[in-house]
């Protein structure tokens, strides 16, 4: 199984809503990532969890809150988002040594109204 | 910080070869990667090259690395319409910090 599964595929939310994005992998990977991608732009790193501990936070606003309940699951909790947060949110995983291939999910297309 | 640049657009005819170029500023990445993204999808790893290598061939894909010039290229032989996508090169800039290039949109004309 070389799959990273993200749910939901699409999400529309208002600026006062609270929602969560979910990501799951069963490859035994110990590093998991959240990226944000705007249309026609490269992915931008948001967070990295390594061995279930937050290793990197790229100065992301606190309205985005990551969580790694176990080595297979990664969540991104969303609260009080702004319209400019509308984007494709991609989850990825890698073995965990810090210099290896990334496996991506198909993403959640988020629209904030 | 690390800067990774690509040309924005490439158009080729079906059956021709495509060459996508990438330049980067930081040469400390042990591996350099090529990813493909189709519309509405995530990124798919196509191939990668170890920084001590000059060339790697993988079926229709050939990766060339010129470390002196900090230049990476991806050649796709016998390009097909299914190859139409956005292609990103990526390098590492610190542990877990993958930096993606600006992306090249490849359009294959039938």
Image: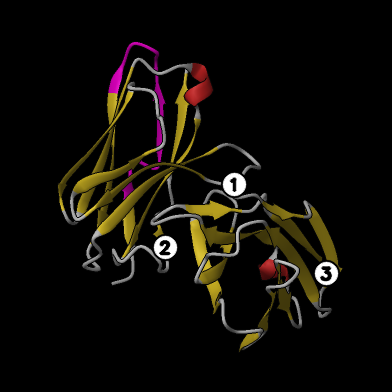
Q: In this rendering, would B2 be left or right of B10?
A: left
Q: Which disc number belongs to residue A102?
A: 2
**How dense is the environment of label 2, judged by Cα within 10 Å: few (below 14), some, or many (20 and up)?**
many
In the image, what residue occupies the spot 56% across and 76% down?
Answer: B51
- Indicate the position of residue A15 as horizontal and vertical percent values: 39, 13
Disc 3 to disc 2, C-alpha distance: 32 Å
- Quarter the N terminus of chain A occupies: bottom left
* Element at label 2: loop
Q: Which disc number belongs to residue B110?
A: 3
The boundaries of the magenta stretch are A6-18
Q: In this rendering, would B41 be left or right of B57?
A: left
- Indicate the position of residue B19 as horizontal and vertical percent values: 78, 72
**Whether marks 1 and 2 lie on the same chain:** yes
Foreground disc of the pair 3, 1: 1
In the image, what residue occupies the spot 57% across and 53% down?
Answer: B100
Disc 1 to disc 2, C-alpha distance: 15 Å
* B78 is within the stretch colored magenta: no
* Element at label 1: loop
B69 or A22, which is in the foreground? B69
- The residue wearing badge 1 is A42
Q: Chain of mark 3?
A: B
Disc 3 to disc 1, C-alpha distance: 27 Å
């Amino acid at each position: 199984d070389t799959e990273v599964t993200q749910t939901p595929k699409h999400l529309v939310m208002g600026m006062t809503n609270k929602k969560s994005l979910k990501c799951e992998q069963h490859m035994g990977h110990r590093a998991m990532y959240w990226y944000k991608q705007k249309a026609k732009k490269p992915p931008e790193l948001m967070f990295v969890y390594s061995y279930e501990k937050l290793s990197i936070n790229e100065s992301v606003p606190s309205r985005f809150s990551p969580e790694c309940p176990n080595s297979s699951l990664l969540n991104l909790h969303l609260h009080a988002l702004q319209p400019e947060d509308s984007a494709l949110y991609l989850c990825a995983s890698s073995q965990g040594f810090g210099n290896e291939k990334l496996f991506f999910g198909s993403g959640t297309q988020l629209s904030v109204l | 910080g690390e800067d990774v640049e690509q040309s924005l657009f490439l158009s080729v005819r079906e059956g021709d070869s495509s060459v996508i170029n990438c330049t980067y500023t930081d040469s400390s990445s042990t591996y350099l990667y090529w990813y493909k993204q189709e519309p509405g999808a995530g990124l798919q790893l196509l191939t990668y090259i170890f920084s001590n290598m000059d060339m790697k061939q993988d079926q229709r894909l050939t990766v060339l690395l010129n470390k002196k010039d900090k230049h990476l290229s991806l050649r796709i032989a016998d390009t097909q319409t299914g190859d139409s996508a956005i292609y990103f090169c990526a390098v590492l800039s610190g542990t877990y910090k993958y930096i993606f290039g600006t992306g090249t949109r490849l359009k294959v004309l039938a």
